[in-house]
Amino acid sequence: MSSYDAAVVGGGHNGLVCAFYLAKAGRKVVVLERRSVVGGAAVTEEFHPGFRNSLASYTVSLLNLQVVRDMGLKERGLKFVKRPVANFLPIDQNRYLTVGGGLERTQAAFSEFSAKDAERLPEYYRRIDAVADVLRQLAETRPPKISGGLPALLKLAWQVRDVLRADIAVQNDLYDLMTKSARSFLDGWFENEHIKSVFGFDAVVGNYASPDTPGSAYVLLHHVFGELDGEKGAWGHAVGGMGAITQNMAQACVEVGVKIRTDAEVTRVLTDGKFVNGIVLAGGEQIKVQTVAANVTPKLLYQKLMSPEDMPADFAQKIASTRYGSGTFRLNVALSELPNFTCLPGTDLQEHHQSGIIMAPTLDYMDRAFIDAKQQGWANEPIVEMLIPSTVDDSLAPPGQHVCSLFCQQFAPTLSNGQSWDDLKPKAVEAILSLVNSYAPNFKASILGMRVLSPLDLERELGLTGGDIFHGAMTLDQLWAARPVFDYGDYRGPINGLYHCGSGAHPGGGVTGLPGKNAAAVILGEK
């Protein structure tokens, strides 16, 4: 029987980050990954001969700069390419809206739709950035254990000091973003429906909800508090795909002594009732270990890898009631040529091809997509974000050809009446492709091959409960000290030696590395 100081269950990016910090501190660490490659959702795979792309996660902004530095990712060759413009929103056959390329350029684009909105934009950015600065600080801290008495209250006061010291406008904006719907929040700033849509899109990315759902404004904010190469709010691509991030992370782990095992599916976390004492793999192999850091979803951990008797009954009930399902459908598509948008024609490379292309022209459109999904399982006209990473990274496709990712909402995590995504996947794919083709009529004819991941595929292949890319809903009742459940936001599980190091822990989803970094610090007794 092999023995380690710590085992990390799941080799996604957060698991690798956690393992790195533990091993760097002198712990003997093993990473156990069910698939044949580490990286979780952040891997690059060939999905059609000669065409490679990021499997599920697809763009970079939230990755913590300290993690990048500590793991030496850039020294290992990791490169990021910034989008020339952030987003391109085709509206109809003749009109479009672009965001990015500098404040003045964005204001000029907005002024074609609303002079008032263009004038308000600098103040909107300033106020959003002020709130985002507060959240960046909170994201790097360990939430207090609310039941911890006076020490917990003191820690709470210390962590929210920036909120308490902030201008009253920042406090008010933070409250609004935590409680309001995206529409309600954006209505307070802008008048034009398309301008509201280009911002409101961030509120439904990975969020099975309407922009009218209370609390959806926070998801909007979660997507803007990142940075790329020190530029706040910037988004870009990792050269080589998202797998370039995790493969460099794996190299850093190996160099500090981490043992990485692939094709190593964990089927059981062993306890003696109070303490973790081992891991069982598929096939029966046992590993002796006193610390387990779980990078799988909390529901998978507590409902499949452990038994109810291993944890307090109230904790098990809380886990059972947590909400999963991001309503996400994911396509990787091999293309013979670039999309020819009717509102901005041409198959020669233009900067809008290098941006985030959002096909959802209004908040009403997004609301209808969610209503459709609730009623029949999928949106008749889905919300689609297209990225074409081969426009900035020619290693991903043959010369003159391209790969694109289609990140799509809204698709029910669980279908009703005994239906399965295995049967209904073709209908969903047709809805997605037809929608894209309505904006770029050459799209369908240019398709050479595809890789399709329904919510069920995301669960089966990547262990994402309900296909949830965030490891649990990003709503106020499942954030900070309540992530994964209330009073367990401090990365510790209900059993001694058990920790949460994945996106199901604070600060939540996205390729940040922070849950892994923060959990490692807790395990090492640093905070």
Image (tube, helix red, strand yellow):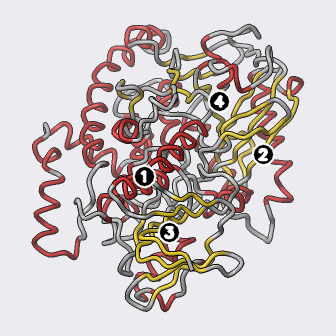
In the image, 97: left or right of 334?
A: left
Q: Residue at x 77, y 21 (%)?
A: 440
Name the secondary structure under disc 3. Answer: helix
In the rendered structure, find residue 73 and report the number of the disc placed on it.
none
Which circle's residue, 4 or 1, is located before the other in the chain? 1
User: Label 1 near label 4: C-beta < 8 Å?
Assistant: no
Q: In front here: 134 or 69?
A: 69
The quarter of the rendered structure image containing the N terminus is: bottom right
Q: Amino acid at mark 4?
A: Met
Q: Dot 2 surroundings within 10 Å: few (below 14), some, or many (20 or more)?
A: some
Which label sits in the foreground, 2 or 1?
A: 1
In the picture of the structure, the residue carrying the numbered disc 2 is 452
The quadrant in which the C terminus is found is: bottom left
**Are the two marked residues, 4 and 2, in contact with CB atoms closer than 8 angstroms?**
no
Q: Is residue 100 visible?
A: yes
Tag on residue 359? Answer: 4
The residues bearing labels 1 and 3 have C-alpha atoms spaced at a distance of: 21 Å
Tell me whether circle 2 and circle 3 mark residues in contact (CB < 8 Å). Answer: no
Q: CA distance from mark 4 to mark 1?
A: 39 Å
